[in-house]
Amino acid sequence: MDSQPYQPIRPGVGMEENFLSIDDILLSHERLPVRTECVFPRLGFLEKSSDSQDIAEGTKMELPLWLSKGLYERNRKVLSIELPKVYRDGWRTVFNADPNVVDLHKMGPYYYGLGSQMLHFENPENTEIGQTLLQTFIGRFRRTMDCSQNAYNEDTSVLLERLDSLEKALFSSGQSGLNGFQSWEKGRASQLTASTLVLNYRKRKITEVQS
Amino acid sequence: MDPSEAEFLAEKETITIIPNFSLDKVFLIGGDLGPFNPGLPVDVPVWFALNLKQRQKCRIVPPAWMDVEKLEEMRDLERREGAFTPVPSPFYMELSKLLLNYASDNIPKADEIRTLVKDIWDTRIAKLRLSADRFISQMEAHARLDNLTLMEINTIRSFLLDSLNCMYRLRSNLQPGSSKDRADY
Amino acid sequence: MSDATFEDECDVNQDDSQEDVMTPAELIAKLEEAWLNEKFSPELLENKAEVVECVMEQLTHMDANLQRVKKGDMKASIHRMEIDRIRFVLSSYLRSRLQKIEKFFPHVLEKEKCRQAGEPSLLSPEEFAFAKEYYSNTEAYLKAVALKRMPPNLQTVDMLKAVPEPCLDSFVFLRAKESQENILVEPETDDQREYVVDLEEGSQHLMRYRTVAPLVSTGAVQLI
């Protein structure tokens, strides 16, 4: 478990993002449906569907999260953000009824991360969204735990396929606990293995030689 | 923590051996060992006992709890009770593994003991998961875990602590203003 | 080999005119405590320079004595095994500190900068040098791979913001070494109320690090 040569930076999960976390960088590229609330002069080339020079007020388009966050201001209306479907009332009812039936990978895969980020934008439903995120996590916890703590030495892709990226990370920390114990019990922990850093270093050398 | 580190700590426990050699007292940094006289039982740390055993210099006296009848009682109690029952040693799992692997000829009914310890372990781990789920779903802030051992905590540590962390973050979403706005880099 | 060589160093520290006299066994126990606490606490703890120094002294001394012993001596082999075990704990302790320094380097350095004159430092001089070097290497790396190609106004990264802070609200497992009464447990949800718990000696708990952090540094609780 400690043999990882470097520690990847974890996603920030809540409203905060971790600047150097790969997961959070990917999350910031998720697209959000937005509506422009003013004219964006001379940016028409970004909007392929019209030929005009400007992006007109009231245009509906999709923007990545990082750009939406940058342009959004509470006081001055530049654009308004529409809530993605999963966070709307209809889906919230589904989540509140039984969070375990939802395929969060398909709906996400950054269901919790993006949901938390949505709270940056003013929306009367924010409290409910936050509540649903928390309750969904709690409701699915048992399943995430059981999967990760019981699946030893088997193909886990089926178990993983419906999990959100956050749950996947938890799944793998559960697995590392289980696998660590199992290999200790079988006496494999006493064998020394090369660090992955060393292994990768060797690989790189070979490719360097080949090129 | 790595399971082998838990095992390392377990190796500091003392155990009785019957040496077949003689040696004066040894003054280690961590305390004195011996003196050793053939046939006379003496208490030593497990790491030293196993080393001697591997060099065929002693016989290990298994701890009193490493006994089929006692373990059967413990297993039944563990299955009956909802809470964690007291364990015979805070390192029962590690010690069983070490002694059964390296000194099974000194332990009567070693195979039965192996199965019993595993049964006790499995029952306790099932309880541990149950309580972890309860802890999360009730959003509790404190739990008392008196009889839990290090190795047991270890199997669930990173999973449970990471999950609690995520839950904490998702909950702080609900308290606006509690987390700093870091949108502007 | 004579045991006198080993006996005479079981009383280091005693002539060291330190206020608290520790036996070597107690010293090793202190190191193990520090090791586990460091392993399990979410933040970097205060460095235990004296403990590390004393243990190092013991090890070097013992090593020197063993040099003089001929091969195959049974006592020497026992001593070597013990030395290896102690060295393992020592390196693991130092390594887990370095890992945390790597993880939180800007915050560690910031704390060091804000430290009052009389306050003890979190870092040993070597760790401080390591942290500073890690900081400048990271900065140089980011500059080389990306920042120097950015527009001039975007060429700096605020490390304090970019690197996550240690989360003191993490939960930890702990054992009470001394009884503690009236530890305030803050509520997790709005409909819960805060309450107090007593940590009886020897009892084990799961709770937030923030609540028990002061007790970890006084040694009243041990993280497990």
Image: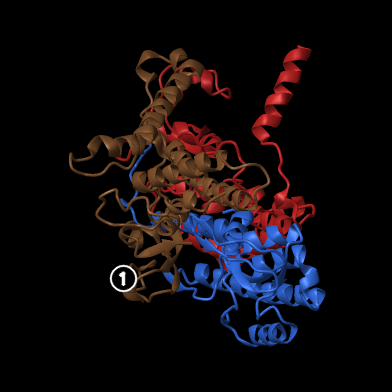
Chain colours: A red, B blue, C brown
Decide which of C42, B19 is in the foreground and name it: B19
Kindly indicate the quadrant of the structure image that contains residue A198: top right
* Residue C123 screen position, x and y as percent: 34, 39
Classify B130 as above or below C78: below
- Pointer 1: what residue? C183
Residue at image position (54%, 64%) is A138
Q: Tell me the SS state at disc 1.
A: strand
Classify A162 as above or below A32: below
**Left of B7 or right of it: where is A36?**
left
Residue at image position (57%, 51%) is C79
Decide which of A36, B28 is in the foreground and name it: B28
* Residue A96 screen position, x and y as percent: 55, 66
Residue at image position (59%, 78%) is B87
Decide which of C127, A32 is in the foreground and name it: C127
The three-letter code of the residue at mark 1 reads: Ile
Residue B25 appearing in the image: yes
Few, some or many C-alpha atoms within 10 Å of disc 1 (few <14, some 14-19, many ≥20)? few
Kindly indicate the quadrant of the structure image that contains residue A17: top left
Task: Chain letter for mark 1, please.
Answer: C
Classify C89 as above or below C198: above
* Residue B79 screen position, x and y as percent: 67, 84
Decide which of C158, A185 is in the foreground and name it: A185
* Residue A191 screen position, x and y as percent: 73, 47
Q: How many marks?
A: 1
Kindly indicate the quadrant of the structure image that contains residue A209: top right
Residue that sits furthest to the left in the current view: C117
Residue B129 appearing in the image: no
Quadrant position of the C terminus of chain A in the picture: top right
